[in-house]
Amino acid sequence: MIRMKNTRFGTLAIDEATVITLPKGLIGFSDQTRFALVEREQGPIAFLQSLVTPTLAFTVLDASHLRPAYPALPAEEVAELAGATPANMAILVVVAASPSDRSLRANLAAPVIIDCLSRSGAQVLLAGTDYGTSVAIGSLGPVDSVRERTPSSVLLRSDAR
Amino acid sequence: MLVVKRGVGQRLVFSGGIELTIVSIGRGVVKMAVSAPRDVWIARGEVHDATIEANAAAATTLTSVFPTTPQPEVALPAEGST
């Protein structure tokens, strides 16, 4: 069990089996290589909590909540960019609240691809698409707020190994 | 940094199986073709830089926007481990 003090969630007790490894870090944050996915009780927004820097957590959204289906690329192509296999692939998009109106904006150009079995992955840039880096989520249709067994939920399960 | 002149049809080759070919040269615009292994992503510099900004914005998005239930200690669920 890993204990992380001083996170935005207080002290986190994290099962080593749930740790997500991004060997190259997030883009612009190459030293942040180990994360835990912290889901909220309600809503599809989750946090990629850094296990390197306790005070650092990134707001993310499981891409399976996006409509139309995202990304509009062959799953195999997307998976290969991160060394994942399509069947075990979870896709997270980094989201942020706009400072002006607090609307939710997602970077659809650079998803975080994670292989649920190896629990490792990478943030990749999608070439050959028109995806923007700050897309209002509303323009993609409603965000499904129903919690189902989404890939990110699977990521938290140690039996997914 | 390498600064090199290349003409149409000429290539630059990088380690890791990456190749850049000059396709055409227009008024102030160069068209290039890049080929790389399937696990290498290629992106415009602006998109890369905007992604750094977007990541930073996500890191500072206040918890108050997406409230979490405050708990002194949050144990992430891991089935099979008690």
Image (spheres, coloured by chain):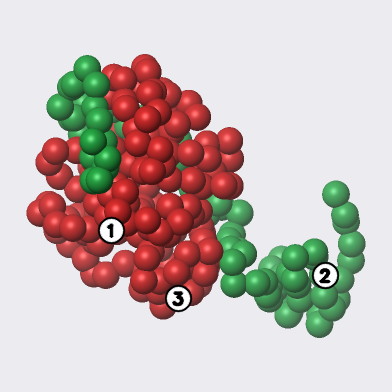
Label 3 sits on residue: A76
Judged left or right of residue B17, residue B50 is left
For mark 3, name the chain: A
Q: In x, y percent, where is residue B33?
A: 68, 76
Q: In x, y percent, where is residue A41?
A: 14, 38
Residues beneath discs 2 and 1 located on the same chain:
no
Instruction: Tell which circle, 1 or 3, labels the residue nearer the N-terminal end.
Output: 3
* Snapshot quadrant of residue A76: bottom left
> Which residue lies at the image location 31% right of the left edge and 49% below the top edge?
A158
Residue A151's disc number: 1
Q: Classify mark 1: residues with Cα within 10 Å, few (<14), some (14-19) or many (20+).
A: some
> Which residue lies at the image location 51% right of the left edge and 47% below the top edge?
A22
For mark 2, name the chain: B
**Which residue is farthest bottom?**
B9
Q: In x, y percent, where is residue A112?
A: 43, 53
Examine the rendered structure and indicate whether residue A144 appears above or below residue A94. Answer: below
